[in-house]
Image (spheres, grey):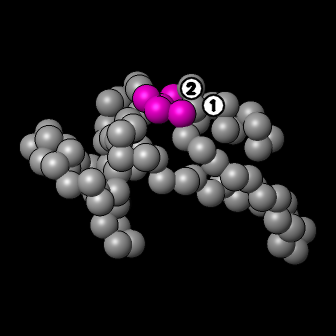
Amino acid sequence: YGRQLRSKINDATSSRLDMDTTVLELGNRIILRLDVKELPFANKPAWQLETKDTWVRRGATNFKADPEMIRSGFAHENAQWLI
C-alpha cells in the first residue's frame, strides 16, 4: 500500500516528493505512516495539480497561500512550502 499511496500522491503533485513509509500496528489496526521530506528550495513550492493550491507551514499551522505570499516566499530561502 505504501508504494501505491506514494505513486498517487506524486501523480497529483507538481513536484516529486521524497517520502518514507512505516507500517505500525496499534491494537487491532494497521496504520501506514508517511513522512514527507522537505523539498529543496529550488523545487518549492509544490502544489496539487488538480486545484493548483499551495499551502504554507508556519509552526504547527498550515494555511492556503495567496499569490502575493507565494511571490514573496521565493525571496526567503527558509520558507516552508507544502501541498
Q: Quadrant of the C terminus?
A: top left
Q: Is 15 in the magenta?
A: yes
At 82% from the left and 65% from the top, the residue drawn is: 24
Q: Which mark, residue 8?
A: 1
| Viewer-proximal residue among 29 and 4 | 4
Give residue 16's position: percent from left, percent from top.
54, 33
Q: Which residues are magenta?
A: 12-16
Query: Which type of secondary structure does the marked residue at label 2 adopt?
Result: helix
Identify the amino acid type marked 2. Answer: Asp
Crowdedness near tag 1: few (<14), some (14–19) or many (≥20) residues, C-alpha within 10 Å: few
Q: Is residue 19 above or below residue 49?
A: below
Query: Is 62 placed left or right of 73 in the picture?
Result: right
Magenta: main secondary structure equals loop
- Residue furthest toward the right? 28
Look at the numbered discs 1 and 2 and tell me whether their residues touch, using CB distance below 8 Å.
yes
The residue depicted at 76 percent of the width and 37 percent of the height is 3
Q: Position of residue 73 (x, y in %)?
A: 19, 50
Q: Which residue is mark 2?
A: 11
**Marks 1/2: CA–CA distance:** 5 Å
Let me know if residue 63 appears in the view: no
Disc ID at residue 44: none
- Badge 1 marks a residue whose secondary structure is helix
Q: Residues within 10 Å of mark 2 (few under 14, many from 20)?
A: few
Q: Which residue is situated farthest in the left direction here?
A: 68
Residue 50 x/y as whole percent: 40, 25
Above or below residue 54? Residue 79 is below
32 relative position to 43: left or right: right
Q: Residue at x 78, y 58 (%)?
A: 22
Q: Let me know if residue 68 appears in the view.
A: yes
Q: Residue at x 27, y 54 (%)?
A: 77
